[in-house]
Image (cartoon, rainbow, N blue to C red):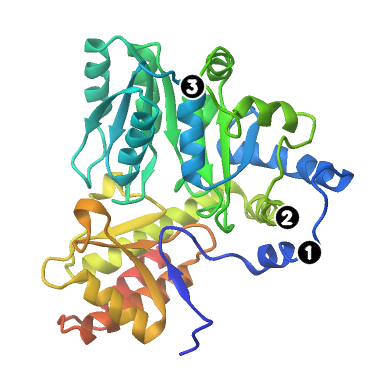
Amino acid sequence: MFTDQPILRIPGPTPIPPSVRQAMSQPMIGHRTQETTELLTQVRPKLKPVFGTDQEVVILTGSGTAGLEAAVVNTVKPGEDVLVIVTGAFGDRFAKICDAYQINTQRFDVKWGEAVNPEDIAAYLKKNTSIKAVFATHCETSTGILNPIKELAKVVHDNSDALFIVDGVSSIGGVETKMDEWNIDLLVTGSQKALMLPPGLTFLAASDRAWKVMENNGNSRFYLNLQKYRDSQQKNAVPYTPALTLMFGLEEALKLIEEEDLQHIFNRHHLLRDMTRAAFKAHDIPLLTVDEFASPTVTAIRPTDFNPEELRKTIKSEFNLDVAGGQKQLKEKIFRIGHMGYCTPADILETVSMVEIGLRKIGKEIELGAGVRAAQEIYLK
């Protein structure tokens, strides 16, 4: 086994296309130069269709969590009431960020592995009229569910004056998202998922309504002040030193997205999801969530008769294949396969084949090839 040939099938960071790696190897430039101005001129308009917006998509150097924190600190003041929909570890993270800023955080907890029911949120908002913002996660990476963001946006705006703020870190670029049409007020993503880049950039877009709230928010903030980024970017400049190497990669990644076409990308991710789920169903290995709410970017598997950590260790040792484990209350109970960004049907067929061997190695009685065959049949349809 070549140790320099890892096979990465986790829900982020994800594999990087060769052309993106090559773009990031070009010589450094100054961040106050004409070259950076030209770089921003190229990437700014190409980010907008990925978000489904005509608004400015601001680029910050930082992880996706920095984007989530920026979404909180720019829109809500200490002591204000917010509702955080928690369907897994990353909804819980949104709540913890709010708590850190002395915001009155009301949690709406949903059983992990299930998506939230929009009507439940409508009923909650009718009874709790002081809510200033509702926070939700589009793809809950820890469970592999996709929340119904379009429907949630409608019930939030029909039943309150709250902003609707969405974590799209593991969905944007892999799942159709129409920020403007769906009436999302603030949308966040990170570079290391479906956008096919290393970690280190976070992206945010806001509605006109959200910008007005942010402009009138006296909450203290400096590096995470989104107005500074918006105002600078509209002049094709940056307020602080950016991660220019990642920006080089971003330019190339956006070219690849444009060449493949967003609708084709969304269709590909649905295919990858369906192939993965079919493979485990063929072996009667339970999936954590139902088909209706299954994410196109990550699949969570919850076995009942073998140890998922033993399987992960085995396929890592045998093939240098990395799949993710469970988080928090699902730790050592599930494993997760990421299939977003630079991932093809061939990658899923390879992954399923290796997992089948791993299952045999740990003593699970399965028919070799049954999962591969099921995935192949989905592909052929």
Residue at 88% across / 44% down in the picture?
34
Q: Which disc, if any, is residue 75? A: 3
Left or right of 147, for residue 17: right
- How crowded pointer 3 is (Cα within 10 Å; few <14, some 14-19, many 20+) is rated as many
The local secondary structure at tag 3 comes to helix
- How crowded pointer 1 is (Cα within 10 Å; few <14, some 14-19, many 20+) is rated as few
Q: Which disc, if any, is residue 231? A: none
Residue furthest toward the left? Answer: 305
Q: Nearer the viewer, residue 338 or 83?
A: 83
Measure the alpha-carbon separation of dots 3 and 2: 30 Å
In the rendered image, the quadrant that contains the N terminus is bottom left
The local secondary structure at tag 2 comes to helix
Residue at 21% across / 85% down in the picture?
360
Q: Is residue 5 visible?
A: yes
- How crowded pointer 2 is (Cα within 10 Å; few <14, some 14-19, many 20+) is rated as many
Residue at 36% across / 13% down in the picture?
158
Amino acid on which disc 3 is placed: Thr
Q: Position of residue 110 (x, y in %)?
A: 21, 37
Q: Which disc, if any, is residue 248? A: 2
Residue furthest toward the right? Answer: 34
Residue picked out by circle 1: 26
